[in-house]
């Protein structure tokens, strides 16, 4: 059994992309690291292979404040590969704060790697192949515009706080939104009912699918079906270009999960975000 560290996303993808694509929606993050653009020179990519050269475990980390992302080939547990990966990562002393992976894998790795762990978020990975029609709320969907940048960064900051994920500062998020505006391959929709009341965005893609993200409705506009309407509209637009779309939904939020299931989204697996606490074991 061998630990391999890759010098580039391309080299990592040459060994892992076909394997990751067998569970394409589950592995959308790792696949987007390979296929997406941007400066990846400081990113970390690694794998554990068996004696025949087959990949057993894949890993990627894009730097702070993000967790390392792991995948066991075909979701088949392999404690020997996991132990080797953990030992090599400790030797490298990479400062990742935690792990993001399928629930069982994330918790097994955390127990091997760290003395204390804290599950900060559990997410249902959901997929949609066909939208179930729903009665739309009053209003309509429109694309994000430059003028929306006066309020959308604040919506997205609260979204991060509500979902217990990494919080970006407002200037950083505003710049990311400008990049989203300039990318014709991405969709960001605002639902407007006299004024903006909800939003949803497509932020990354794989070979055959795209991910819905940043679904947010301010509290005083909730309960009126705006989120269902904007997610349904965005999902329909995505399915005009891709075979499927998917999303990460807070497993502890039955309201949002219920909204997505009514639209035709179905559960694939649960991902855990586990933060390490104290000294590494």
Image (cartoon, rainbow, N blue to C red):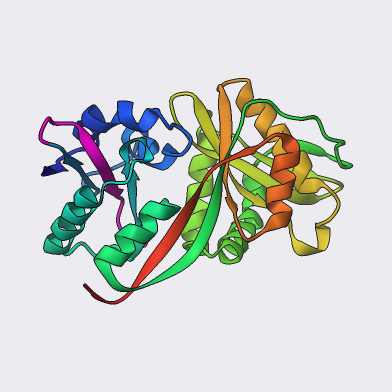
Q: Quadrant of residue 117?
A: bottom left
- Outermost bottom residue: 278
Instruction: Give the answer, above or below, for where 150 lies relative to 20.
Output: below
Q: Quadrant of the N terminus?
A: top left
Quick check: is 62 in the magenta stretch? Answer: yes
* Highlighted range, magenta: 51-65
Q: Which residue occupies 66% across, 37% down?
A: 265
Quick check: is 143 in the magenta stretch? Answer: no
Q: Quadrant of residue 130?
A: top right
Q: Which residue occupies 27% across, 32% down?
A: 16
**Residue nearest the observer in this picture, 253 or 268:** 268
The answer to whether residue 142 is visible is no
**Residue nearest the observer in this picture, 80 or 193:** 80
Looking at the image, residue 133 sits to the left or right of residue 79; the answer is right
Q: Quadrant of the C terminus?
A: bottom left
Looking at the image, residue 186 sits to the left or right of residue 259; the answer is left
**Residue nearest the observer in this picture, 260 or 9:** 260
Q: Quadrant of residue 273?
A: bottom left
Q: Which residue occupies 62% across, 24% down?
A: 239
| Residue 29: % across, % down | 41, 42
| Residue 58: % across, % down | 27, 42
């Amino acid at each position: 059994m061998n630990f391999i560290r890759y010098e580039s996303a391309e080299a990592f993808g040459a060994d892992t992309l076909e394997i990751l694509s067998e569970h394409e929606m589950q592995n959308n993050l790792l696949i987007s690291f390979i296929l997406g653009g941007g400066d990846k020179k400081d990113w970390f990519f690694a794998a554990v292979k068996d004696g025949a050269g087959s990949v057993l475990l894949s890993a990627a980390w894009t730097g702070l404040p993000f967790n390392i992302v792991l995948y066991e080939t075909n979701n088949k547990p392999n404690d020997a590969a996991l132990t080797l990966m953990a030992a090599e990562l400790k030797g490298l002393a990479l400062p990742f704060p935690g792990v993001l992976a399928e629930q069982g894998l994330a918790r097994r790795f955390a127990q091997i790697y760290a003395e204390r762990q804290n599950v900060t978020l559990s997410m249902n990975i959901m997929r949609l192949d066909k939208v179930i029609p729903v009665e739309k709320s009053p209003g309509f969907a429109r694309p994000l515009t430059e003028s929306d940048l006066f309020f959308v960064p604040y919506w997205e900051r609260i979204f991060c706080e509500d979902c217990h994920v990494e919080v970006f500062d407002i200037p950083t998020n505003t710049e990311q939104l400008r990049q989203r505006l300039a990318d014709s391959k991405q969709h960001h929709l605002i639902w407007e009912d006299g004024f903006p009341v909800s939003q949803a965005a497509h932020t990354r893609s794989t070979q055959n699918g795209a991910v819905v993200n940043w679904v947010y409705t301010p509290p005083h506009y909730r309960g009126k079906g705006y989120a269902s309407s904007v997610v349904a509209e965005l999902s329909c637009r995505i399915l005009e270009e891709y075979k499927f779309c998917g999303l990460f939904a807070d497993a502890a939020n039955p309201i949002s999960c219920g909204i997505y299931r009514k639209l035709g989204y179905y559960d694939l697996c649960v991902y855990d975000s586990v933060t390490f606490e104290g000294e590494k074991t």
